[in-house]
Amino acid sequence: MGRAIAGAGASLAIALALTACDPSPGAAPSAPAPSQTATAHPTPAVEVPIAAATPPSARQPVPPVRVVAVSIDVDMPVVPVGVEAGGFMELPADPAIGGWYRFGADPVASDGNVVISAHVDAPQYPIGPLSRLRDLTAGETVDVTDAAGDVHSYAVQSVTYYPKADLPVEELFARSGTRNLVLITCGGQFDSRTGRYADNLVAIATPIG
């Protein structure tokens, strides 16, 4: 798959940067200073509840550790990945290992897509399991096991080839408004001059139950 998902670079890096700059949860604007009056009047005594200054801790993600698609003989471990220096999604070197985008949703999350990707092949390694992603058809099941041992089942909705420049990054990596499983690898024609494939192959599946 080369070393990254082309098209995910700039917008993905910008999204991460914007997230890091969000104001702290619970922050409130300071109250304006009281205006001066000629005569000071006593104010009634009231009890004001005091909220803790520290916001509650965020839910700890439960990473996916395995993805299985029985119909295409895919059974592969999954590890968390981030973003590499060029701003592209990081991927394990071995095509037999999937990478879960750890800045997005995990299988337990109530919102956002779970994105898992892997190389289709790589030097010094056998061709990867996701080389068979193109054979996945609508209605078939993909199971994702999380680190707690729970299995999350998804029904395939579509399998689509995208030219790398046209990959809908914002849609696939959405953090709200959808709860899909997104599987990504490379496909299409291989360019021996650049060592890259022309397309990305994307399977989208929705939660069952």
Image: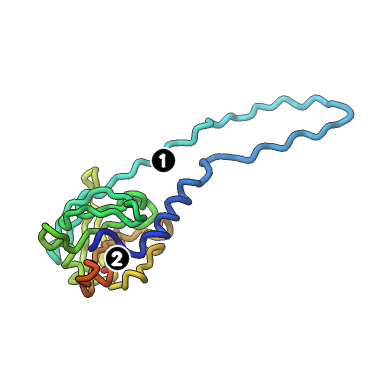
Does any portion of residue 137 appear in the rendered image?
Answer: no
Q: Position of residue 134 (x, y in %)?
A: 20, 71
Residue extending furthest bottom?
A: 189
Dot 2 corresponds to which residue? 204
Q: Quadrant of the N terminus?
A: bottom left
Quadrant housing the C terminus? bottom left
Sooner in the amino-acid sequence: mark 2 or mark 1 = 1
| Left or right of residue 133: residue 36 | right
Q: Name the residue rendered at 38%, 67% in the picture.
A: 168
* Label 2: which secondary element: strand
From the viewer's perspective, is 24 left or right of 198?
A: right
Please, is residue 46 above or below residue 171 in the view? above
The type of residue carrying mark 1 is: Ala
Residue placed most toward the observer, 199 or 52:
199
The image quadrant that residue 29 belongs to is: top right
Is residue 136 visible in the rendered image? The answer is yes
- Could you give the CA–CA distance between mark 2 and mark 1, rounded to whole angstroms? 27 Å
Specify few, some or many for label 2: CA neighbours under 10 Å numbering under 14, 14-19, or 20 or more.
many
Amino acid under disc 2: Ile
Q: Nearer the viewer, residue 153 or 173?
A: 173
Q: Secondary structure at mark 1?
A: loop
Measured as percent of width and height from the top left, residue 188 is found at 23, 74
Question: Looking at this view, is 86 or 9 the one in front?
Answer: 86
| Residue picked out by circle 1 | 58
Mark identifier at residue 203: none
Quadrant housing residue 119: bottom left
